[in-house]
Image (cartoon, rainbow, N blue to C red):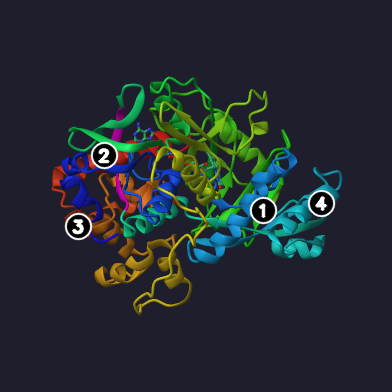
Amino acid sequence: MNGQWQRGWRAALPSLAEREWDLLIIGGGITGAGILLEAARRGLKALLVEQRDFAWGTSSRSSKLVHGGLRYLKEGQFGLTRESVRERNALMREAGGLVEPQGFAFADYVDGKPGRKMFLLGLAIYDLMAGRRERHYVDAPEFLMMAPNVGRASLLGGICYTDAKTDDARLVLRVLQEAQSCGGVAVNYLAAQNLLRAGTKVTGARLVDGVHGALLDVRARLVVNATGAWADGLRGQAGAGPRIRPLRGSHLVLPAWRLPLAQAVSLMHPADGRPVFAFPWEGVTLVGTTDVDHGAALTAEASITRAELDYLMLALEAQFPQLGLCEADVLATYAGVRPVIDNGQADPSKEAREHAVWVDDGLLTVTGGKLTTFRVIALDALKHAMPLLPGWRDKLEPRPIFAHRALPAMRLRGARRQRLEGRYGVSAGALLDAAGPGELALVPGTQTLWAELRWAARAEAVQHLEDLMLRRTRLGLQLRGGGIEHLERIRAICQRELGWDDPQWDASQAAYLTLWNTHYSLPT
Ligand SMILES: Cc1cc2nc3c(=O)[nH]c(=O)nc-3n(C[C@H](O)[C@H](O)[C@H](O)COP(=O)(O)OP(=O)(O)OC[C@H]3O[C@@H](n4cnc5c(N)ncnc54)[C@H](O)[C@@H]3O)c2cc1C
C-alpha cells in the first residue's frame, strides 16, 4: 500500500470495469481481505469491493481475541479449536505488535462451574493442541495478587492460561496492505448491487460507488461472496436459500482506572453459565460478550440492547463486587453480528462456529468461522475456487501471513515501535516521517499517536470521519463521548490531509456524532 492506495483507485474507478479479473471478492472484512491476500500472492488478478468501510461489518466489532476458543471444546468442536490454536500461534509469531499474548485468569470458587477439574482438562487439551504447556493452578493468595479485584468470598484459587488479542480492524487493514503489495486491489464504499450472469452462470457484479453514486459493471472469472452475516443476500440472487443465523454479540468499554486488570479475567455468567471476560485492551478495559439472535435488519448498524447491558453489568457485579461499577462508568458500547451457519439449535451458543463454503451458479460463498482462522478460511476458499478457474493451479501451502521486509530505522523504540510495525508494516517509517510537531505524543488515555490520525487521513482511504475514529484508529471506542473533546485537534491535523472543505468536515462530524450517540453509547 503506498500513500495513494485508495485515492488512486477511486479516481480511476471506471478502469476497474475495463480490466479482466480472475476474482471479484465482495466484502471487505477479514474473510475477504484474507482471500485477496492469498489470491494476489499466488498470481491471481483480484479485486475486493466493500459496500461501506473496510472492516465495517463484524470484523471491527469482535471480542478482539485471537484464540483457540475454549468454549468450543465444550460444544465438541475439536477441529475448530485445533485449527484456531495453530493459527493463534502463527499470528503471534508472524504479526508481533498487532497480535499479542494475553494472560487469562479464571477464579475458582467453592461450587463454581465448570469446576477446577473440568477447566484444567479443557486447558490440557488446549495445550496439547498448541504443543506447549501454558496452564497452571494457583492458590487464592497468589490468584489475588494477579487479579486483586475479584470477589474473595469462597475463593479457592484460580487457573491461569495464555491466549492472544489484537486490534481487529487494524488486522484487516494490515492484511489488505499486504495484499495490495502483492498486486491485489481493494476499494471501499463500492457495493455489489446485482450479480451479472451469462446464461445461468454468475460472471460479475454491478457495483455502486457509495461516494459519487456511479454504477459500474465488473466481470470476473469467479465471483466470491465474502459478505459474512450478509451472505444470504447475494446467495439469494444466485437462487440459493438462506443459511445464516445472525447472532449479535455486544461489548462494554470501561476506563482502565475503573476496572484495572493486569490479566484478562474470564468467568461463567451467574445467570446462564456462559463464558464472559474482561481484558485490558489499548488503554481501556473491554467486557463481553453476549450471544443472542439479532432479529433487526442488517442494513442498520447493530447496537447493544438494555437487556444485554444489564446482563454484562450483572457479570461485572458478580466478579468484581468491591469495585461498585455502574453504567456511568461505561465509556462506549459496540455490537457485532456473527455470521453463524444455522443448524437449528434452540440455544444460539450451541450453534457451530465453523466456516462454510458453497457454490451456487458459479458464485462461491465463504462465510462463518472466526477472525483467528482467516488464513485457513482463505486457503479453503481458494481450494474450492481452483476447479472454477481452469488453468490455475497452486499447492495452497500456508505462507507467513506477512512477508518479512527490512524496515527503515525509526525514531521510536520498544513497545511503541513494535506496535506501529505490527499495525502499519512497511508504512510505519513513512507514518513517523509524516508526523507534525507534537504528534508523536499519545492521544490522552489511549495508546494511539496523534501521528496515526494524520497518516490514516493521508494514506488509508478514509471517506468519512467515522472511518478514522472507529476503524483506522479506535478512538471512538476508547474516549468518552466518542472523542468529542479532541475533535478540534483532530480536525487541525486531518482536514487538509483529507482534502475536505469546512462544510464537508462539519457534515462528516455531525454524522459521526449522531452515529456514535445512536449505536456506540448506552442504550436509551
Ligand atoms: C461479538 C463477536 C465477537 C467475536 N469475537 C471473536 C474473537 O474474539 N475472535 C475471533 O477469532 N472471532 C471472533 N468473532 C468472529 C469474527 O469477528 C467473524 O467471524 C469475522 O469478523 C467475520 O468476518 P467476515 O469478513 O466474514 O465478515 P464481515 O467482517 O462482516 O465482512 C463482511 C463485509 O461484507 C460487506 N458487504 C455486505 N454486503 C455487501 C455488498 N453487497 N457489497 C459489498 N460489500 C458487502 C459488509 O459491509 C461487511 O463489511 C466474533 C464475532 C462477534 C459478532
* Residue at 43% from the left image edge and 26% from the top image edge: 235
Q: Main secondary structure of the magenta part?
A: strand
Which residue position is annotated with label 2? Answer: 510
Which mark, residue 497? 3
Which residue position is annotated with label 1? Answer: 265
Verify CB contact (< 8 Å) between mark 3 and mark 4. Answer: no
Q: Marks 3 and 4: which is nearer the front? A: 4
* Residue at 61% from the left image edge and 40% from the top image edge: 313
Of the two numbered discs 4 and 2 on the same chain, state the one appearing first in sequence.
4
Which residue position is annotated with label 4? Answer: 121
Q: Compared to 262, does 225 lie above or below?
A: above
Of the two numbered discs 1 and 3 on the same chain, state the one appearing first in sequence.
1
Mark 2 CB lies closer than 8 A to ligand 1: no
Q: Compared to 24, does 88 lie above or below?
A: below
Of the two numbered discs 3 and 2 on the same chain, state the one appearing first in sequence.
3
> Which of the two residues, 443 or 403, is positioned nearer the viewer here?
403
Of the two numbered discs 3 and 4 on the same chain, state the one appearing first in sequence.
4
Q: Marks 1 and 4: which is nearer the front? A: 4
Is residue 242 at all visible to an observer of this figure? yes
Looking at the figure, which quarter contains the N terminus?
A: bottom left
Q: Residues within 10 Å of mark 4 (few under 14, many from 20)?
A: few
Measure the alpha-carbon separation of dots 1 and 3.
Answer: 41 Å
Where residue 187 sits in the image (x, y, percent)? 28, 45
Q: Secondary structure at mark 4?
A: helix
* Residue at 26% from the left image edge and 39% from the top image edge: 510
Q: Secondary structure at mark 3?
A: helix
